[in-house]
Image: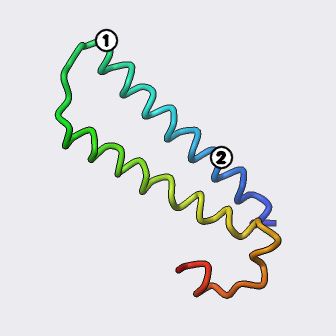
Amino acid sequence: TSSDQHPIRAAAHLHLLGESLSLIGHHLQETNKTVSMSSSVSLLLDSLLCALAPLMSLTTQIPELTSCTEHTLDS
């Protein structure tokens, strides 16, 4: 079923996000560029937002949360 693939999709999404962040980090190390604090914070916040959706989808896989309403899970 579709819900059986949620963990696989979430894992793939987080894996790709991790690879992207690693590539950015390696590129910055190789070029020895100094990065402004605001751009670093912006990148980390963007990454956090990208990670939230797959993590939230995994809440449907926790048996203890099956009795919760959508509103409760969303909040």
Q: From the image, tell me which residue sits under label 1.
A: 30
Q: From the image, tell me which residue sits under label 2.
A: 11
Q: Which residue is painted at 35% across and 51% down in the image? A: 45
Q: Quadrant of residue 20?
A: top left
Q: In the figure, 68 relative to 15: above or below?
A: below
Q: Could you tell me residue 26's position as x and y percent?
A: 39, 19
Q: Which residue is painted at 57% across and 47% down in the image? A: 13
Amino acid carrying mark 2 in the image = Ala
Q: Is residue 30 left or right of residue 8?
A: left
Q: Is residue 16 left or right of residue 62?
A: left
Q: Is residue 65 left or right of residue 46?
A: right
Amino acid carrying mark 1 in the image = Glu
Which badge, 1 or 2, comes first in the chain's sequence?
A: 2
Q: Which residue is painted at 78% across and 84% down in the image? A: 67
Q: Quadrant of the N terminus?
A: bottom right
Q: Quadrant of residue 34?
A: top left
